[in-house]
Structures are given as structure tokens and as C-alpha cells.
Image (spheres, grey):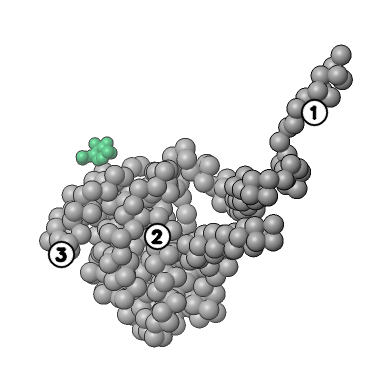
Amino acid sequence: MRRGILIFLITTIVVLGFAVHHVWTLLELLVIDGREDAILRAELPAPNSGAISERPQLIPKIIHQTYINESIPEHWKGPQQSCIDMHPDYEYKLWTDKKSREFIAAEYPWFLETFDGYPYPIQRADAIRYFVLHHFGGIYIDLDDGCNRSLDPLLAYPAWVRKTTPTGISNDAMGSVPRHKFFLNAIDRLPDYNRRWPLPYITVMASTGPLYLSVIWRHYMKAQPEEADRVRILFPAEYNNHSWSFFTHHLGNSWHNNDVKLIFWMASHWVIITVIGFTLGLALLWCLYSTFVVARQANTHKGKFAYSRIPFYRRISSKDIELNDRHQV
Ligand SMILES: *[C@@H]1O[C@H](CO)[C@@H](O)[C@H](O)[C@H]1NC(C)=O
């Protein structure tokens, strides 16, 4: 019996250890918020301050956006135009499906097979933004984000991304100098993460989307890059909703599907889901333990009442059935 429990405990620890090790980066993302790399509101000049022009401008003045083709839907024309109008001295690049493919074929041919093989168009739209930031540098903005003030102050950081709640970073607004090491990592690892998961939403998130970028970000920051290579984080207040924020957020996420509701529900209930998961896992281990380890000991000892030692689980004996029958009379 003692040995049985020991085996049970060791198995449980090994299984738990393996599970935790496997999802360690994801668990870290739940607690790490990148606060130490925050772009502090105090260091940002006010929207019309003269101090803006005194700051270094490392990131080239290019705005990148993506869409299927040149016909931007009506509801995104406003946000798109707000960014163009506010930045007359910036180059504007719209990456259509056709242009994106030509660009990958010409500049990153090693990636073309993966790029063409993606089952969901949004994966190509995700991937292309990392490549153009790596190649040209500049600022990528989702079409559903409008501009609320000049982006000039954000040119002062070699690379920045936006924080999302409750966890991780997003890929809907990002800036970078050309060939920044973070975006080098982001394009280099794409083929490794090109896996299919049971739900399209997870596949997109984990292969090219915000979850992918968050995992790459964690690995990158854990390697403790030098100060100039660190990725600065734009927090929600500086992203939108305030007069000093950079963006205004409009109708979003054209690609979200039904499975998204399930995922969002799971994300908002992740504590209870984790507890249920571990409980079910432990219960399963206990059942296996009772069935195989204890049953085998019972056999080797040839004990008549061996099963009565098993706490959660008892075979019905013919005696029980007799009693039941009598009660029913
Ligand atoms: C652009 O794509 C949209 C959506 O697929 C389509 O309805 C439209 O006809 C396309 N426009 C052009 C000019 O090809």
C-alpha cells in the first residue's frame, strides 16, 4: 500500500511537472505585464508640445497597413484617413494580398511556402506586418485603429508594441527600426509555430497572431537583450481612450468566428477551468491507481476484502444487491 501511494505521488508529480513545463511561457504571460519596459506617460510630450521635435527619431516615418485589396470598406476609411491626414510627412504603404505575396517572394523567399500554405488569410495578414517592419521599419497600424495625435513621439523607441489585458501583447499597433532583433525573431520563428489547433481561433492566435507574438516576446525578453534592443510597451491609457492617447479604436476584428466566444469565455474563467482541469486529471490518476495498483496488490495478497480499502471506489458485491432487492419489496 505504501509503495502504491509513493508510485501515485511520483506519477502525479511527473505528470504535473511535465504539464507545467509545457505551458510555462503561457503561465508567465499571466503574471508578467512588461511594466519595466512601459513607455511612461510622463516621458511622452503632450500632443501639441514643442518638445516633440527635440526627441530622437529612430523609426523611419512609414505607416504600414494591410487589406485584401485597394477597396477599403467604408467603415474603415475614416480611421485610415485620420492616420494619413495627421502624418503628411510619412510614407503610406497599404499591403494588399497581391503586394504582400510579391514582397515575400522577392525579399524572403524562404518563407513563401509557409506563407502560401496558411489556411486562414488573417495568418498572412499577421505575418506580413512582422516582415515589413523587419525590412523597412516604420509603424504598423490595424485598419480599425484611427490616429488621435501625431505618432512622432513613438519614433524615439527602437521597437514598441502594445500591451493587452489581461495578458500578453497585441500585434495591432507596433513600431520598429529596420532589422530590429525582436522582429527578426518574430519572422524567424514563424515556420516553427505553423501548427493547426482544434479551433481556427487558436490556430490563428498561436501560429501568427497576438499569442504567437507574446510568446516570442517572452522568450526574447528572457534572453535579456541590451537596452537598445529592448521592446518598449505602450499601455492601454497611452494606446486609446484619452486625449493624450495615440489611437482611437473602431469596429474591430473582422475575422472573429463562433469559436471566439468560447475562447473569450474560457479566458475570463481561466482560474476555474485550470482548477477543474487539474481536479479531473488527479481524479483520473486516482482511478487508474485504484484500478491497477491496488487491484494488483489485492490479487497478490489474495485478500478477500481488498477492495474495501479503496476509498472512492468499491465494487458492488452480491450482498448489496440482495439488500436492495429486499428493500424494494
Ligand atoms: C476587394 O475585396 C473585396 C472583398 O473580398 C471584394 O468584394 C472586392 O470586389 C475587391 N475589389 C477589387 C477591386 O478587387
Q: Amino acid at mark 1?
A: Lys
- Percent x, y of residue 241: 54, 60
Estimate the spatial distance between the alpha carbons at disc 1 and disc 3, rounded to whole Å: 79 Å
Q: Is mark 1 within 8 Å of ligand 1?
A: no
Q: Is residue 314 left or right of residue 19?
A: right
Q: Nearer the viewer, mark 2 or mark 1?
A: 1
Per the image, the residue denoted by label 3 is 107
Q: Nearer the viewer, mark 1 or mark 3?
A: 1
Estimate the spatial distance between the alpha carbons at disc 3 and disc 2, rounded to whole Å: 22 Å
Looking at the image, tell me whether mark 3 or mark 2 is earlier in sequence order: 3
| Viewer-proximal residue among 226 and 203 | 203
| Viewer-proximal residue among 47 and 249 | 249
Image quadrant, ligand 1: top left
Q: Is residue 1 above or below residue 50?
A: above
Q: Is residue 188 left or right of residue 210?
A: left
The answer to whether residue 62 shows anywhere in this view is no
On-image quarter of the N terminus: bottom right
Residue at image location 25% in from the left, 64% down from the top: 132
Residue at image location 40% in from the left, 55% down from the top: 206
Q: Nearer the viewer, mark 3 or mark 2?
A: 2
- Percent x, y of residue 167: 53, 62
Query: Answer yes or no: do the residues labelled 2 and 1 have beta carbons within 8 Å?
Result: no
Query: Answer yes or no: do the residues labelled 3 and 2 have beta carbons within 8 Å?
Result: no
Per the image, the residue denoted by label 2 is 212
Q: Mark 3: which secondary structure?
A: helix
The crowd level at tag 3 (other Cα within 10 Å; few <14, some 14-19, many 20+) is few
Q: Amino acid at mark 3?
A: Glu
Residue at image location 64% in from the left, 57% down from the top: 4
Looking at the image, tell me whether mark 2 or mark 1 is earlier in sequence order: 2
Per the image, the residue denoted by label 1 is 319
Specify the quadrant of the image occupied by residue 226. bottom left
Q: Is residue 47 above or below residue 129?
A: below
